[in-house]
């Protein structure tokens, strides 16, 4: 049996080359004192590798396994240690610094308080704490949500994590509003974990429930946003009623930073979220005059509100970073993250086989000219429109369209609603997945789609929103 | 990296070789690590295989088995291309090792070989690990060898009895258990000179000269002198008897209890091992003896080297080293006559007797009876692993835990290796990874078997593995764990932090949240001292926690092997489940939360939410022979058969018959669940696509009991409303 070379063997291609990327070989060793953190940033192209050599340490509340190398791509995070540790770091980190002053004591005390509430909920068989996290952009809301979730998991709870921020994804793609019960370890490398895949995964998969919002900010389509919040809250509440473990664990809700913009914030949307999820604890991150106002508005026998210091591990995240971050999340949805390599499939289909609905989005009418908008413009607080209970043709949520070149490189949400369902049905239907428009041939009326699952794209109502922004190089 | 394939391959090979050199015991952790590395470096498979083969060939016999286990792990867990590359030389690799190892190791190797004729366990691929063409020839050779050995064994036994009767050399008997005395030395009376004359080999003169300078003729006095001469004796504590300098003391023939076979396996650590590993001349071919002699001399060389590391100024040993080097050259280079081989064997045996008495007992790695490792100073460890010793004592390196003392387990035995601070390796990640692994070996060696095995002692899976020989050859693991476990537990004195305080009484207000409450932190750490080394999850130190951790590790093992299997097929993201399914979905807490499936099923039953668990379903074994031999149509694994008392006939456990086909009930439940999810989403094709991921948990879900489960979709629809 002679073997001339490796190239002739099947399956020896580039499958596992990613691991060999780091260029810095010498590990830098950091000894951390108790209750300090090591903040670091890494780019998307040069991941950072972290190994806990001694002691114990956690990233966003999830403890690191000893002598295991964690590879973090495009991360802005911190390793925190309660008892001291030694870390080895390799790879190109943009920033690495040790921080002594952290608000971690407040955060873990918050967890302690939530645990008290869960404890008593468990004995009374009532609902555990429903926590709403509010704060400005880059205050560390998602970090705190992740931390509280991780601590709850560590305490054998099964909290529901809810993401109401369309600018980033939770187990899904940006633009989706998502809820998921977390009963198993969060994935330090990916952030939260992985949604179901067709094969086994080293960490248990998390099961998200997604609704597609498809707009950049809540304010750009408050009506749709509210409907989806209501929808999501109903599902979360139902789950809590049905599932005893989840019920006593409660839920942790992450919100977009845009809700705090302006003198009064977006009180209307906050109020909606609080009432739909029956929030009974509001955590306000950072120093802000808004806190006092919210305190007046919400504090009462039903709702506790507390102010927490901003996370010190939060780096300012530029628009370009956030964009890259989102694109990474989209890429991860199709191609997997870290050790999980997924194989999406490209399918070509006739226009006629798809029922695509575009979101009627008054603020961003032309989704494809929004490449370089100023953030401030987008966060202009919008005056909530008086709710219209009847849908007139002129005020429709969606508009049925035929595919066009405009859709090139954008994401489409495949809902669970039938292709000829009513507007409300489409809106209220959860998402079964996303497909990516790889190419449109208007002449031959063919559309080429990248789909996570092979086979025909399901004959369902498909939503095309202005958000997330298009990903140019998803399919080579 | 891709642009320098050769350089990269070389670096990987070097790093792999170095990692191999540290593979001195059957260390599951290490083997897994190397397997993963090999798996991720399939582009360098050829170089890795060459390294591995060379290593198995060159390393001393005691280290061959771990390396063979690694080979086994590669071919079973990674498969192609390793199977192809390693298969080419498998016969040679295997038998080169087989001829020089002791019977226990041979047995383990035979078991290993048997498994190679089978398909990979839990795999869908029905082909054996290695193709029949390779294994068939090995099989017949093995059979021949075994019969020869059997005869040899009998002859040896007779020789031993005879010699005991004669009892000519009490001193030798004291120093070398007669059972293990090689026949040649006995019958030739340790006299090399007469042989020299007969030797036509031009090199024989040199050999003779060397032999003269090191040979200690048979007089007990000389022998003792030789033992004593170079320096102080170690306390006779370590396996004491064989090395005691009192020749007249009689020793029972069974010096080495079989379970302590570490010293026996190692030819270099004790003299008996030489004779032990050498079959008598009557049955062993000339070439085989020569090979064995080479291995032995290599072992001596290694040991002398190890000795010199600690006694760098011992001139005598330096000379010995030089001479051994020459001897090795001779052996490697030329054809030696039987006679000169025999005489050299005598010399080597004597040298081997001399050596172990010098260095402080546990110094060199060959004697790595695992329990001794933790007692070695880090400096020694560092030297042994070829690193520069760490100037600062390790205790001072971790950040000092404030206000409480380091636990006792840290202080006396600093358990982690001196950290590999400046690694001057090439900038290749794989090489670097291995360097890290290698550097951490001293930590991992004592640690990993304990974490992996000790808490999982009740764990069936591992038991089975051990029984099947896959984890064999590590009898010390259990005894080991007692010593090592404290080292593993977090090195902080948690008990001080974890005062029993059932309720935190933290209020959510800005002031209360700033008060330091160690017990809140303690509940996440100190109350859960037992950490999983794979994922970092923590378990309570109490009995229930141990059990949970056992389940958890079991789960890791299953999952990891599933993941390994799945690499062959393409994996894709599944569709999400819809809201009703999501509400009915129950998280998969099996394993990861330390609950076994049985416990979960029991819980489900206690809640009255499940009817017949798939696991409990069974069908009578079909009478049709073809059917009865068929595996589950889904997972392609055979059914487990048991006798059903009520039916008075054999049944298949966990089985279901659908139409004409038989499935595992659990497999079927998963797949149909998956299909249900897919159907709900009206996915036309790829029923599995929507399924497996979601099905694992939802197979246990409780469709009937949920609030919204009975509602129709329309009912579930909501109106928009603003508050």
Image (cartoon, coloured by chain):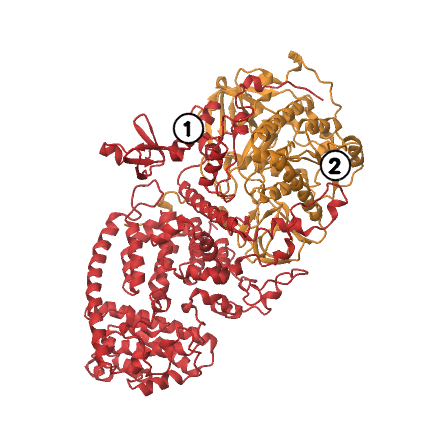
Residue density around tag 2, few if under 14, some if 14–19, many if 20 or more, within 10 Å: many
Above or below, B187 relative to B384: below
Q: Same subunit under labels 2 and 1?
A: no
Q: Quick one: A132 or A401, which is closer to the camera? A: A132
Colour orange, chain: A
x, y percent for residue B695:
46, 32
What chain is tagged by disc 2?
A: A
State if disc 1 and disc 2 touch (CB < 8 Å).
no
- Pick out the residue farthest to the front: B646
Give the quadrant of residue A218.
Answer: top right
- Pick out the residue farthest to the bottom: B221
Above or below, B300 relative to B89: below
Q: Quick one: A20 or B647, which is closer to the camera? A: B647
Q: Colour of chain B?
A: red
Q: Quick one: A328 or B348, which is closer to the camera? A: B348
Q: Quick one: A239 or A142, which is closer to the camera? A: A239
Find the distance from the CA under tag 2 to the CA under tag 1: 46 Å
Q: Which residue is mark 2?
A: A305
Q: Which residue is mark 1?
A: B672
């Amino acid at each position: 049996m002679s073997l001339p070379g490796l190239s002739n063997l099947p399956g020896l291609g580039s499958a596992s080359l990613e691991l060999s990327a780091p260029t810095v070989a010498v590990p830098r060793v950091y000894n951390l004192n108790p209750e300090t953190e090591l903040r670091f940033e890494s780019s998307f192209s040069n991941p950072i590798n972290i190994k806990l050599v001694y002691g114990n340490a956690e990233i966003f509340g999830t403890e690191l396994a000893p002598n295991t190398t964690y590879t973090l791509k495009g991360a802005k995070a911190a390793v925190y240690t309660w008892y001291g540790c030694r870390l080895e770091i390799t790879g190109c980190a943009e920033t690495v610094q040790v921080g002594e002053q952290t608000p971690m004591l407040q955060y873990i005390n918050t967890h302690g308080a939530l645990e008290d509430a869960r404890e008593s909920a468990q004995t009374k068989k009532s609902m555990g704490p429903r926590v709403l996290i509010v704060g400005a952009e880059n205050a560390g809301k998602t970090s705190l949500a992740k931390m509280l979730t991780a601590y709850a998991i560590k305490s054998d709870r099964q909290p529901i994590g809810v993401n109401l921020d369309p600018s980033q994804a939770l187990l899904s793609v940006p633009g989706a509003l998502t809820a998921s019960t977390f009963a198993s370890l969060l994935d330090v490398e990916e952030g939260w974990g992985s949604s179901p895949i067709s094969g086994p995964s080293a960490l248990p998969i998390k099961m998200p429930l997604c609704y597609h919002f498809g707009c950049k900010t809540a304010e750009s389509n408050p009506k749709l946003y509210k409907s989806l919040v209501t929808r999501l809250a109903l599902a979360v509440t139902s789950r809590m009623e049905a599932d005893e473990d989840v019920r006593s664990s409660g839920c942790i809700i992450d919100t977009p930073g845009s809700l705090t913009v302006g003198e009064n914030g977006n009180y209307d949307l906050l109020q909606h979220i609080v009432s739909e999820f029956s929030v009974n604890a509001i955590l306000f991150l950072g120093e802000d005059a808004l806190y006092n106002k919210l305190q007046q508005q919400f504090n009462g026998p039903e709702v506790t509100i507390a102010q927490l210091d901003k996370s010190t591990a939060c780096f300012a995240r530029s628009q370009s970073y956030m964009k890259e971050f989102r694109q990474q999340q989209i890429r991860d949805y199709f191609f997997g993250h870290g050790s999980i390599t997924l194989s999406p499939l490209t399918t070509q289909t006739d226009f006629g086989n798809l029922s695509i609905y575009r979101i009627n989005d008054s603020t961003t009418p032309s989704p494809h000219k929004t490449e370089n908008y100023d953030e401030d413009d987008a966060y202009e607080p919008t005056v909530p429109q008086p709710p219209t209970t009847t849908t007139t043709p002129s005020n429709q949520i969606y508009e049925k369209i035929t595919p066009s070149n405009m859709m090139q490189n954008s994401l489409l949400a495949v809902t669970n609603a039938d292709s000829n369902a009513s507007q409300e049905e489409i809106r209220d239907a959860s998402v079964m997945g996303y497909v990516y428009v790889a190419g449109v041939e208007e002449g031959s009326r063919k559309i080429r789609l990248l789909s996570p699952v092979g086979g025909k794209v399901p004959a369902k109502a498909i939503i095309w929103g202005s958000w997330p922004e298009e990903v140019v190089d998803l399919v080579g | 990296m891709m642009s320098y394939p050769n350089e990269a391959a070389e670096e990987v090979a070097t790093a792999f070789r170095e990692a191999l050199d540290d593979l001195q015991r059957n260390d599951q952790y290490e083997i897994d690590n190397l397997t993963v590395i090999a798996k991720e470096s399939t582009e360098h498979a050829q170089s890795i295989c060459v390294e591995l083969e060379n290593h198995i060939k060159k390393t001393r016999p005691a280290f061959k088995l771990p390396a063979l286990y690694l080979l086994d792990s590669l071919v079973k867990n990674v498969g192609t291309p390793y199977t192809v590359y390693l298969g080419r030389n498998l016969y040679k690799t295997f038998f080169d090792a087989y001829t020089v190892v002791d019977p226990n190791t041979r047995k383990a190797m035979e078991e290993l070989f048997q498994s190679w004729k089978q398909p990979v366990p839990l795999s869908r691929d029905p082909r054996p690990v290695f193709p029949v063409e390779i294994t068939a020839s090995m099989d017949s050779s093995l059979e021949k060898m075994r019969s020869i050995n059997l005869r040899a064994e009998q002859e040896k036994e007779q020789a031993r009895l005879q010699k005991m009767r004669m009892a000519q050399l009490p001193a030798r008997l004291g120093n070398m258990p007669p059972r293990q005395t090689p026949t040649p030395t006995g019958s030739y009376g340790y006299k090399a000179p007469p042989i020299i004359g007969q030797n036509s080999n031009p090199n024989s003169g040199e050999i003779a000269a060397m032999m003269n300078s090191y040979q200690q003729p048979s007089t007990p006095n000389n022998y003792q002198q030789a033992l004593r001469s170079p320096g102080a004796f170690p306390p006779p504590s370590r396996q004491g008897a064989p090395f005691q300098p009192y020749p007249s003391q009689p020793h029972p023939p069974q010096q080495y209890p079989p379970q302590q076979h570490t010293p026996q396996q190692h030819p270099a650590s004790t003299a008996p091992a030489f004779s032990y590993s050498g079959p008598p001349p009557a049955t062993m071919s000339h070439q085989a003896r020569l090979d064995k002699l080479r291995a032995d001399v290599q072992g001596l060389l290694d040991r002398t080297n190890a000795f010199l590391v600690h006694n760098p100024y011992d001139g005598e040993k330096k000379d010995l080293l030089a001479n051994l080097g020459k001897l090795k050259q001779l052996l490697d280079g030329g054809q030696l006559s039987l006679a000169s081989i025999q005489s050299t064997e005598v010399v080597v045996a004597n040298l081997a007797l001399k050596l172990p008495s010098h260095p402080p007992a546990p110094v060199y790695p060959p004697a790595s009876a695992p329990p001794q490792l933790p007692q070695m100073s880090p400096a020694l460890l560092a030297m042994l692993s070829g690193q520069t010793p760490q100037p600062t004592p390790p205790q001072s390196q971790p950040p000092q835990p404030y206000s409480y003392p380091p636990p006792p387990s840290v202080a006396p035995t600093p358990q982690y290796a001196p950290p590999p601070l400046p690694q001057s390796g090439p900038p290749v990640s794989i090489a670097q990874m291995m360097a890290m692994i290698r550097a951490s070996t001293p930590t991992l060696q004592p640690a990993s078997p304990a974490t992996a095995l000790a808490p999982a002692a009740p764990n069936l899976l591992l038991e089975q593995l051990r029984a099947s020989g896959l984890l064999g050859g590590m009898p010390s693991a259990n005894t080991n764990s007692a010593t090592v476990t404290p080292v593993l537990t977090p090195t902080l004195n948690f008990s001080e932090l974890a005062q029993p305080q059932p309720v935190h009484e933290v209020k959510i207000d800005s002031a209360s949240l700033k008060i330091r409450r160690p017990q809140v932190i303690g509940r996440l750490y100190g109350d859960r001292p037992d950490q999983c080394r794979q994922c970092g999850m923590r378990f309570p130190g109490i009995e229930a926690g141990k059990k949970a951790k056992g389940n958890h590790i079991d789960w890791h093992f299953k999952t990891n092997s599933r993941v390994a299997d799945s690499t062959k097929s393409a994996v894709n993201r599944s569709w999400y489940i819809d809201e009703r399914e999501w509400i009915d979905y129950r998280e998969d807490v099996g394993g990861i939360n330390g609950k076994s499936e049985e416990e979960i099923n029991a819980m489900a039953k206690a809640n009255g939410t499940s009817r017949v668990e798939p696991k409990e379903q069974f069908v009578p074994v079909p009478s049709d022979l073809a059917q009865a031999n068929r595996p589950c149509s889904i997972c392609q694994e055979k059914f487990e058969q048991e006798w059903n008392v009520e039916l008075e006939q054999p049944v298949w456990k966990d089985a279901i018959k659908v139409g004409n086909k038989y499935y595992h009930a659990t497999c079927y439940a998963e797949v149909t669940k998956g299909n249900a999810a897919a159907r709900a989403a009206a996915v036309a094709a790829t029923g599995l696509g929507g399924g497996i991921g979601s099905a694992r948990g939802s197979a246990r879900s409780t469709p009937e009991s949920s609030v919204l489960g009975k509602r129709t979709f329309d009912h579930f629809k909501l109106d928009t409303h603003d508050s």
